Image (cartoon, grey):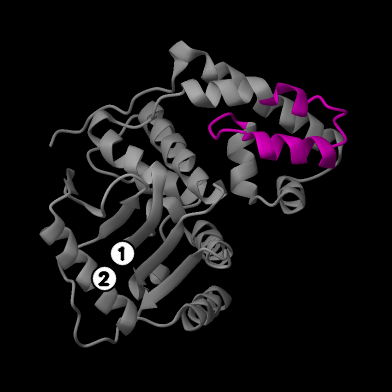
Amino acid sequence: MSERRAETPAEAEGTTELFVALGKMLRLLRERAGLTQKEFGELVGYGPDQISSMERGVRTTRPEFLEKADEVLDAGGLLSAVVPEVERAMSKTRTRHPEWYRSYAALEAEAVELHFYANHAVQGLLQTEEYARAVFTKRRPLLSEETIEQRVSDRLSRQQIFDRWPPPTVSYVLEEVVLDRPIGGHRVHADQLRRLLLIGDMRNVEVQVMPTRVAEHPNLGGAFNLLTPKSHGQVAYTEAQGHPRLITDSEEVRKIADRYGIMRAMAFTPAESRALIEKKLEEL
């Protein structure tokens, strides 16, 4: 499949300008309050990468976040007043992904269960902004700076699935090598490991590591995602060398789900996996 240019945000609906403007306002209020992005994030329940992306307008500032930020930043209703406009903008914004990815992205956005197996790099929904940027920057053939930023923006926008209520059930099986490969360099790698610990602490998320020392492996065919959309049976998604495949055949999906179940049984438990991630972080 030839490399397709990432689509730009939904400029026609006017949503891009709204979230860029809100981001600038948010940054000014935060700085007026004397808070760093990390400090502010801790007060509102978001990571510094998420705060950064909202301040730059590449991540949607959700209504519940604006209400909390208004209180924390003592904005006097300035942020909460725009909640109705944000809700209308969110209802109008179309999926911000390349055309070939839209079917999967739509299913992912409404999924009640999501399960992921990653064997080369941290899966997209878990990536920090800088990790994602490093992934796209090193991609071959080279992508333009505009396309890189759009791909990063789109990836971060998908992570809003963690903000949903009720939350979906989410699990990950990561090969141990994923924890060792320092994509983006030492600092980016360390921040990425911290994000794995942060997401793994969520009540609806389980992160497990498949140890490299395992002598027998039920799945050497590559990474995959398993989704159970609200209005659809379970589906699988794979992508190899730029060739995406959305699998809906129930028998094919069953076989992939069977392999995933075996891997979860063979992998470290979530508690053991957390201890391993913490150990690797300490050793950096």
Residue 59 horizontal/vertical position (percent): 55, 35
Where residue 117 is drawn, which disc sits there? Answer: 1
Foreground pick, 70 / 150: 70
Look at the picture and state if 114 lies above or below 220. Answer: above
Q: Is residue 31 visible?
A: yes
Name the residue located 16 percent from the left edge and 46 percent from the top edge: 245
Residue type at numbered disc 2: Tyr
Furthest residue to the front? 231
Asked if the residue at tag 1 contacts the one at tag 2, i.e. Cβ–Cβ closer than 8 Å, the answer is yes
- Image quarter where the N terminus lies is top left
Look at the picture and state if 236 lies above or below 7. Answer: below
**In the displayed structure image, the side of residue 153 where residue 247 appears, left or right:** left
Q: Which residue is mark 2?
A: 260
**In the displayed structure image, the side of residue 139 where residue 39 appears, left or right:** right
Residue type at numbered disc 1: Tyr
Foreground pick, 214 / 189: 214
- Earlier in the chain: of badge 2 and badge 1, it is 1
From mark 2 to mark 1, how far is it between C-alphas? 8 Å
Name the residue located 71 percent from the left edge and 22 percent from the top edge: 82
**In the displayed structure image, the side of residue 230 where residue 26 appears, left or right:** right
Disc number lying in front (2 or 1): 2
Local secondary structure at mark 2: helix
- Magenta span of residues: 56-83
Q: Residues within 10 Å of mark 1 (few under 14, many from 20)?
A: many
Residue 198 horizontal/vertical position (percent): 58, 63
Residue 151 horizontal/vertical position (percent): 38, 36
**In the displayed structure image, the side of residue 211 where residue 126 appears, left or right:** right
Name the residue located 22 percent from the left edge and 38 percent from the top edge: 141
Quadrant in which residue 221 is drawn:
bottom left
